[in-house]
Amino acid sequence: MDAESLRQLFTAVRAGEVSPDEAVAQLRHLPFEDLGFAKVDHHRALRVGMPEVIFGPGKSPAQVAAIFHRLAGHGDNILATRTDEAQFAAVLELVPAAERNPSARTIVLRQDSKITGKGKIVVVSAGTSDIPVAEEAVVTASIMGNHVESVYDVGVAGIHRLLACRPLLSEARVVIVCAGMEGALPSVVGGLVGVPVIAVPTSVGYGSSFEGLTALLGMLNSCASNVSVVNIDNGFGAGCVASLINRL
Amino acid sequence: MDAESLRQLFTAVRAGEVSPDEAVAQLRHLPFEDLGFAKVDHHRALRVGMPEVIFGPGKSPAQVAAIFHRLAGHGDNILATRTDEAQFAAVLELVPAAERNPSARTIVLRQDSKITGKGKIVVVSAGTSDIPVAEEAVVTASIMGNHVESVYDVGVAGIHRLLACRPLLSEARVVIVCAGMEGALPSVVGGLVGVPVIAVPTSVGYGSSFEGLTALLGMLNSCASNVSVVNIDNGFGAGCVASLINRL
Amino acid sequence: MDAESLRQLFTAVRAGEVSPDEAVAQLRHLPFEDLGFAKVDHHRALRVGMPEVIFGPGKSPAQVAAIFHRLAGHGDNILATRTDEAQFAAVLELVPAAERNPSARTIVLRQDSKITGKGKIVVVSAGTSDIPVAEEAVVTASIMGNHVESVYDVGVAGIHRLLACRPLLSEARVVIVCAGMEGALPSVVGGLVGVPVIAVPTSVGYGSSFEGLTALLGMLNSCASNVSVVNIDNGFGAGCVASLINRL
Amino acid sequence: MDAESLRQLFTAVRAGEVSPDEAVAQLRHLPFEDLGFAKVDHHRALRVGMPEVIFGPGKSPAQVAAIFHRLAGHGDNILATRTDEAQFAAVLELVPAAERNPSARTIVLRQDSKITGKGKIVVVSAGTSDIPVAEEAVVTASIMGNHVESVYDVGVAGIHRLLACRPLLSEARVVIVCAGMEGALPSVVGGLVGVPVIAVPTSVGYGSSFEGLTALLGMLNSCASNVSVVNIDNGFGAGCVASLINRL
Amino acid sequence: MDAESLRQLFTAVRAGEVSPDEAVAQLRHLPFEDLGFAKVDHHRALRVGMPEVIFGPGKSPAQVAAIFHRLAGHGDNILATRTDEAQFAAVLELVPAAERNPSARTIVLRQDSKITGKGKIVVVSAGTSDIPVAEEAVVTASIMGNHVESVYDVGVAGIHRLLACRPLLSEARVVIVCAGMEGALPSVVGGLVGVPVIAVPTSVGYGSSFEGLTALLGMLNSCASNVSVVNIDNGFGAGCVASLINRL
Amino acid sequence: MDAESLRQLFTAVRAGEVSPDEAVAQLRHLPFEDLGFAKVDHHRALRVGMPEVIFGPGKSPAQVAAIFHRLAGHGDNILATRTDEAQFAAVLELVPAAERNPSARTIVLRQDSKITGKGKIVVVSAGTSDIPVAEEAVVTASIMGNHVESVYDVGVAGIHRLLACRPLLSEARVVIVCAGMEGALPSVVGGLVGVPVIAVPTSVGYGSSFEGLTALLGMLNSCASNVSVVNIDNGFGAGCVASLINRL
Amino acid sequence: MDAESLRQLFTAVRAGEVSPDEAVAQLRHLPFEDLGFAKVDHHRALRVGMPEVIFGPGKSPAQVAAIFHRLAGHGDNILATRTDEAQFAAVLELVPAAERNPSARTIVLRQDSKITGKGKIVVVSAGTSDIPVAEEAVVTASIMGNHVESVYDVGVAGIHRLLACRPLLSEARVVIVCAGMEGALPSVVGGLVGVPVIAVPTSVGYGSSFEGLTALLGMLNSCASNVSVVNIDNGFGAGCVASLINRL
Amino acid sequence: MDAESLRQLFTAVRAGEVSPDEAVAQLRHLPFEDLGFAKVDHHRALRVGMPEVIFGPGKSPAQVAAIFHRLAGHGDNILATRTDEAQFAAVLELVPAAERNPSARTIVLRQDSKITGKGKIVVVSAGTSDIPVAEEAVVTASIMGNHVESVYDVGVAGIHRLLACRPLLSEARVVIVCAGMEGALPSVVGGLVGVPVIAVPTSVGYGSSFEGLTALLGMLNSCASNVSVVNIDNGFGAGCVASLINRL
């Protein structure tokens, strides 16, 4: 129920078509968000061009396919994350146009190819093992309507490789940096650019990397003041945050 | 050595005033950043309207005052964080126009009042004890050229207080959310707005809050996909990230 | 030896059938709980209408079935938790009336359908992945003689969904809240109701959720003062505590 | 604005005294909780006989005294927790009837002595060092309108001391158990009673007690199924939860 | 009520002086430990020659002195641990024969100098900083009636120093080993002797010693199979365990 | 080379049968322990009646069988821990008299049935899931020459079950207590007996039991002063320590 | 572009063949490391005699084989770490001269057998379970051109075994020490030698060894001042560091 | 007793001057290290030119001064670490030539200025707050006979500052890198040089830096394979390790 509907309700009350008690009851039983207040508009704004998102783990291939298929009918872009091959096979049967990025483990259906991001999002990864997380960020930001470019395998122990990417970094409106092990790359990238850096710790490493905890802590303590952090292996979240920034 | 100087060097070589070997030697001994490549421009871009920042802890009042005074001569805005009264007293003697926010523990000198942020930054805090961190974010974003508004004491256990702030939240281009204890507020705010949310865990709490660790972990695991996180009590960092986003 | 037996012993002593020394010896060698003192009565009170409980993990299908079958003979309700399909198949052969909730992974035999809980227990879960834990709480509270209702997928990042459940929440005498990731839901629910809230952290999440630790810590630091917490994924324990409260 | 006021608004609209647009505007600008929906009633219910609570740390004596004095004017019971002597001295000047429990570090003003709890709350502590936390629970539950009794120094290494308290435990409608070090007491008490047990880990101990973490973990893993847990040293929270249970 | 009293009760019942019902009631209201069953005897056995122990922290000088003075009247040995100079001064006024070991921070009054330990307890420490903990063990074992010898500063990085102590180690019936930092000493000592080794991690160290946690973990993972461990800095506990072993 | 051999060497030198240089060389190339100093005697003492021990994990069935077979030739008792069925099958082919305890996962060959322990070792476990660890302790202590008795399923939440075991506990010279979850049992047992208690945390539990860490921490912080602790699930270590104590 | 090329560029500028602006452009677009500055030389120096390294995990047999085969063409030594049998089978098909160390899980191709290390590297391990990590260090140091010797199973609980190795230890120019469990061996070895000790914690152990964390912490807190540490199970890293030291 | 003395002993035995029994007794009562075996020689080698070291914390000014004065008489260099002003004042009275570095908190007496290090040790620090730790490394390496140079404030967020130091880095035989916060600097430096890098995490930072733990973990997970790590703030240890390497 939006503001207009609310006005109609009051008008009907005034006209005697609805008694005050009935009006109170109607209001009482409506979900809050239907009252047409500000938040709902924002939610709409938030959703423009946004993909519907399906989180794969714990869902059967049939379930993923069914949800995917139903959402496909709305005409939106669709993104399924952390999917496996079996889930993709099931989706393909119902939605032949769906595509899977095996590295990112994503399935997407692109029905709206409008670019809503105002600039370029650059995704950087430290090592080749970080690429799946980086690709999840790439796919997410891309399906959310952004120009995305990526640079992989530019870890800090070979700093010249990263420095060689400065021209590309200088074109970014937002940078996403994925790194495991010591998680040092966002600090260095943060010092090279004047735009927001979204850091994604990855679970790449062994021993005292503690499945990404070390990288996470390193990024949270970055000495570069333009770095903020998302959860371990959360390429999807980084892609979302970067997309929202890039729309501003 | 910028690009112009580099061109002059080549010109001098051509003119025979400098031998090729001498030119190589000159290049070899110059710091990299003086070559005038792309990054430096970005650094300049980054610094436009940016305050010079002094980190107070571990510096004597005299040291803070001396650095503050020297920087004041450059005409930039100046920000000192985590300062105490004694440091402020020392600064005031040399820079009478400096101002201290005792809650935020900041000292600022505002010499450039240009607003470079394109929209409004809203800073939200969960409890009254989180205010010092929130204020550090407010002061930082403000001195970096933004319109900043703040809403305090809207923790999730009294959700109506937060919902009452929706009109203000809906005006934000970036939202900073500071919370200690369980750190749940960014998730709720993230669900109410369609813009980036910078979450700042605070060390407010006791027992198993582990001086902000619980809030930090909670924020990193936010179920809202527009949330990214900075270090515990890092109001300054949140203010920086928000400012960079708000300039885009 | 209950109070009656004790009286008989004293009577036999008085009658000279048992010497004082023999009586002392008899008392000395009896297990304490057989003396019929207060605690045993409480244990009895505690057990009225309570199911016998079997913890599935580490037991073979044959073992679970044998225990289940033996207990079934006592006429009590029976609850087996964390069971698998093979265990259920074995139980069914011996106890055809047993029923399994595959989501909750419980097997129950309901032989006593008396409702001993005085009000309604409402079980709330944040996401669909938390449902198995929530269902374990539902089944437990239900087999312990309570009216139970549940509301799922009302996580804090879409606060309107939760607010829409207020009428149901307002009817609860006790609320159980299950949530993984940041574990913020109990704080919000706690602020919406005036009754005890039992918080159950779930192991849902990834990366720095640390298999439920983050949710657990968040709930322990809840800013709502009507929240207490049980172990990660302990839907059974929450169901027990809520049942005991609801009998008061 | 409660349901009655809402009905009056609709009546006024019907009577033409308020236009539909004005009515919408009134609704739109009111805080949500003023709409008179269910939750507000609960909040009232929740607050009946409840003290206003002031958290002492971080507040100056003058601040505590001022808040205490203002709240005293409402006629409610007042509870200030974690206060020091200086804060009490300041309160006493403005509110001579205030009383301080130096062990619990609480200041209370009892203006409403109605007993709203239906039974007895028993507070148990393991060692003498746990008494301050236990006393905070006692004071909280007491000021919230409960009969409270306490038993101290009945730690599990001298189990006979605890067993000697069984008669008292058997009278409890809710039991609060405070323990530091290994935090084992709630499990033993939980096995002795058939009512809910609220466990409060305390920071008593040294070395690998990790300031209460060990006790907290122990309590969360209690093998007694009637135990739920609050934060370390949170006697206040335990008192609140117990009070809510005791009103049911 | 001991076994004798119990017999008298039965005799009185037989004599008709007490009715069976009254006898039941008397038994019912007595604390369990007064029934004179086996455990109490053990407690007595346990206490023979044992000191009464006062834990100093959190007690005022006057409190420590008062308790010390009262216990002194029983004729037992008395041990106060973790005391400070002020507490000792207060004790001395009331009990002039009390002695303080400033390194161990203990105060003792020796009124019973019987040696109940059958052999020698040897206390070993890794570094000079571990001596206070080692001394607490020495004082504890000594006041509990043992011959105790100590060897200090024989850390594993200078293994020859330890090897030089083998003759003494070979005379021990129990060995206590105190070490901070990496906590390696118990493993080496464990390999050199054929008797039980009680390992005491100390909080000596810095950085990643985590106030004794590293030493504690090291000792728990000792590759010597005759090592068991007590809490960090718990020289008193080690002295108790060693004493009990040495009495066997 | 023992002291006697050393004397023979010197005698041979005196007799001119061995030159001084040759004697130095002989000493220099001998392992230190062969010099016949005190420690070696102790090692012998330590080894009397001790089993040879094989740690199963990471060894192939053939390897375990080969080692077992070779050791069997020495006439000692043999103990293999943490073995699986395949390893046992392989051992049986070579050593038909070997026996496996499937719960304890041990394989033993008893060739020396002398009882060297002076009293009884009692092994107590909290729950049925702790039995494998308890059985490993039983088998270890038994094969090392002790009378061992065990009591299982006497967890602290049903304290009467434990109290019923007091007569047995009172006969123990050493007690081993195995418990998972909150690990509270050693504290209660410690308070019931006057002899050393070896606590073994088990990995039994889920969620915040952290695979035995919670039980371990609880035991280290035991309020009973006769408790020392070994590593998680280390039934073998507890059996060794108890055996060494029981020989004293 | 090395220094020579740079000189040619300047010469071409002088000769008028390249204009100053073109020269600037050429420099601007070259990767930094191609400028021939010092670091590149060092990289070359670093790489002399160094193997190319392939990290096996996460790569298919075909991928490992393809990379291995391509690198083999350069004439360098090649090292693949953490490989499995399938990867080795694939490599063998393309590079028949490749050899696998099944314990170390390495595959090597030795094409350059020059010894560049100036002395001997000795690798020590505490237990037989640590051998795979130790072997990885041996293989790494060996393929990098060093004389390597190893001593295994000299853990600290049998110190005489280690002392018997002193002659070998005294010949080492660098010592690598691998140990799990309590990680005490590097401290003891560190005290026996006057050269750098590289400590490698291994994940050998169980329970509170926390998969190598305990050993890691122990080594970082070594009381020997010649010990530095690498990541858990990082035999490769230790081999690299030792090789670099041994070339100095 | 070295090998020569041992030979003399045997010779005396042969000559009948010492009986075999007396010879055995002499050997038996000598400390092991006096037997003149290899290790002692190494210890001597280790100690050549090494300072005697005093660890300041926990020692009174008088104690530090007394030890310092006594050691000064041996003619060696002396190093006291983590000292305060009062300790220095006391030392100065007895040893006027002693010097204190207030940043490093060291006191040194240089009596032997021989340079035994073969090359240059370069000490790098990330931020100005890391300087005290870096200076401790500088002083340690210097007093141990090395040429040491230092570069401070070259953190990774301003990578150009570090790159400008490459010429100096390229001259190092060993590099020590001190960094707090995310601890990323050693990885970058490690990639720039071909020599061993000793990484020293510092406790600089706040919040989730956890007093150096984050930096420590980052360094242990360095993607550069020439990095090894010492304890948090252990500038002294890094100086020792570097010195030993530099002597090779």
Image (tube, coloured by chain):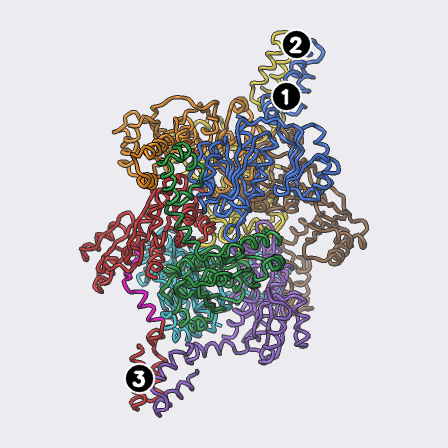
Chain colours: A brown, B yellow, C purple, D cyan, E red, F green, G blue, H orange
Q: Quadrant of the N terminus of chain H?
A: top left
Direction bottom: furthest residue: C15
Q: Residue furthest top?
A: B16
Label 2–label 1 contact, CB within 8 A: no
Query: How far apart are the two marked residues, 2 and 1, measured between alpha carbons?
Result: 20 Å
Q: Which residues are magenta?
A: E39-56
> Which x, y percent locates residue G225?
43, 35
Q: Which residue is mark 3?
A: E9
Q: Amino acid at mark 1?
A: Leu
Measuring from the top left, give residue H80's x and y in whole percent. 35, 32
The chain ID associated with circle 2 is B
Question: Which residue is identified by label 1?
Answer: G35
Given the image, on which type of amino acid does mark 3 rest?
Leu
Quadrant in the rendering for residue E109: bottom left
Pointer 2 residue? B14
- Assign a secondary structure to mark 2: helix
Side of B80 relative to G68 (left or right): left
Q: Is residue F145 magenta?
A: no
Q: Is residue B10 above or below residue G122?
A: above
